[in-house]
Every structure is written in structure tokens, then in C-alpha cells.
Image: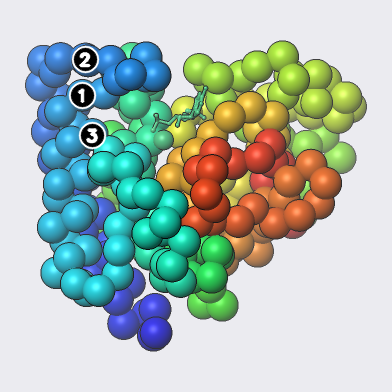
Amino acid sequence: MHYSSILEDVIQVADKASERVLHIYQSDFKVNYKRDDSPITAADIASHDEIVKGLRGISRDIPILSEEGVDIPWEERKHWRRFWLIDPVDGTKEFTQRTGEFTVNIALIEDGEPVLGVVTVPALKQAYWGVKGQGAHRRDRTGRIQEIRVVKPKSARRVVASKNHLNSETRSFIDRLGDHELVQAGSSLKFCLIAEGRADLYPRLGPTSEWDTAAAHAVLTAAGGKIHTLDGKPLHYGKENLLNPHFVAEGG
Ligand SMILES: Nc1ncnc2c1ncn2[C@@H]1O[C@H](COP(=O)(O)O)[C@@H](OP(=O)(O)O)[C@H]1O
Ligand SMILES: [Mg+2]
């Protein structure tokens, strides 16, 4: 598949979803809670609907796995070689707390690897995308597009970690790093900060699901960074259990 031929279309789908998310963000929205007690708003649903409609327009044959979609049994998923993996709003807690640090995430997975990813940050009017072997880009609020690349860390590493889910295990990992500067941020934005050279390291010794990381994972690897598990293995997608193992994302 020629990823570059569908990239523009995927960015357009993410932009449309972002517009709907932002519209709801600026309204007096209601917060409901899912079975696992995590928050959900009309923005998660509107974004999911917009993305599914858009991706179906790009290809009817590629299956879609979404945080807000129906559960698809492993018996069916295990046959997927290629699929879309989406998180319509990552950082829903940030959304409800009105910090602006939430993202719309669309990834294309092939053979367990994120090969294309688009992440938009509706409240900041920013977008990031990355394609395997073709580099990563950021579009800023003025519409200017620039290639982004990780940087080599200086002696004091700039560490990013979750705002709402920074647990004691991650905290003690960070404490053992020595000289560092810690910045807390919500959602998949943390990977993008590394991809654009504004941070060096993102340790996550706590739970995330595949849809939380896939799109930004594609951006980060296309920008020259990597994500690995604590025993040095790459993160894989399309597993029977959709929870990610603990991981560390890093730049140069
Ligand atoms: N106990 C848990 N189990 C699974 N995922 C969790 C979790 N606690 C947090 N997460 C994931 O962490 C994401 C938020 O990341 P961060 O804390 O870095 O902003 C959430 O995304 P959603 O907001 O899409 O639900 C959620 O999927
Ligand atoms: Mg999420």
C-alpha cells in the first residue's frame, strides 16, 4: 500500500473529527462514566462517528478498532493483517478538566506495527503525522507545516509523564534517572513532544491500551524515536489482550 497516497485523506478525516470535538469542548458538555469508571462525553462519540465514516470513505476493506467501538472478538481480529486503530479522544480526563491536552488519534497497523499515524490536538489547533520511512511533520495553528525530528538529549534529560495517571512505579523510575526535568502532560501529546525535540523520555510503568499509543507511536518512530518495553522489545499491536505492557518512549 502507498501510504503517502492516503495520508492527505487521513489528515482530513482527523481534522473533521477535531472540529466536532472542539465544538463540543466549547459547549456546556455533560460527563458520563463508562463501566470501568473512565469518563466519556459526546465528543468521544462524535469523533468516533466522524472517523469511522471518513475511514470507510478511504477504504471499505480495512477493519477499524476504536476505543469507542463495539468489542470485536479475538476470533475475528486474529485474522487482521492490516487495520485502523483509533482513539477518538485520548485524554478524556484532560478534556473534562479543560486543560486542552487531549488528542484525536488515527493509526494504520500492518503486521503489528504502526506504519502511519495522525494525531491532532484540537484545542491547540495542531496536528502531527508520521509515515514509516517517510519522516514526521507538524502543522501549527497558523497552518505552517514543518518536518520534525527527535534531538539528542543533553545531560539533564527532559522527562514527560502523565498528569492524571502518574503512578508510584513510574515516579520511582523517574527518580532513578538522575539529573532531569519533569514536565507532566496529558494524552498522546507526550510522544509528539519527543518527536518534535521538546522532550527526551516518556516512561509509562502503568496501564494504557493499544489505541492510546498507536498513532503517536507512528509519529515518534517516523521522527527517529522509539518505544520499547522494559525488557527492550518493541510494542506490538493487534494482540489478543489490548493492554500495552509498560514501556519507555525516547528520542535521539
Ligand atoms: N487503569 C487504566 N487501564 C487502562 N488504561 C488506562 C488506565 N488509566 C489510564 N489509562 C489510559 O491512559 C489514557 C490517558 O493517558 P494520560 O494519563 O497519559 O493522559 C486514557 O485514555 P482515554 O482518555 O482515551 O481514556 C486511558 O486509556
Ligand atoms: Mg486514550
Can residue 250 be spotted in the picture? no
Going by the numbered disc 1, the residue's amino acid type is Thr
Give the Cα separation between the discs numbered 2 and 3: 11 Å
Give the Cα separation between the discs numbered 1 and 2: 5 Å
The colour mode here is rainbow
Badge 1 residue CB within 8 Å of ligand 1: no
Q: In this view, does 174 lie to the left or right of 178?
A: left
Residue at (81% x, 51% y) in the render: 232
Q: Which mark is residue 41?
A: 1
Nearer the observer, 216 or 199: 216
Using a 10 Å C-alpha cutoff, classify the residue at mark 1 as few (fewer than 14 neighbours), some (14 to 19) or many (20 or more): many
Eyeballing the image, is 161 above or below 167? Answer: below
Q: Which mark is residue 31?
A: 2
Residue at (28% x, 15% y) in the render: 33
The residue pinned by badge 3 equals: 44
CB within 8 Å, label 1 to label 2: yes
Q: Earlier in the sequence, mark 2 or mark 3?
A: 2
Give the Cα separation between the discs numbered 1 and 3: 6 Å
Can residue 97 be spotted in the picture? yes
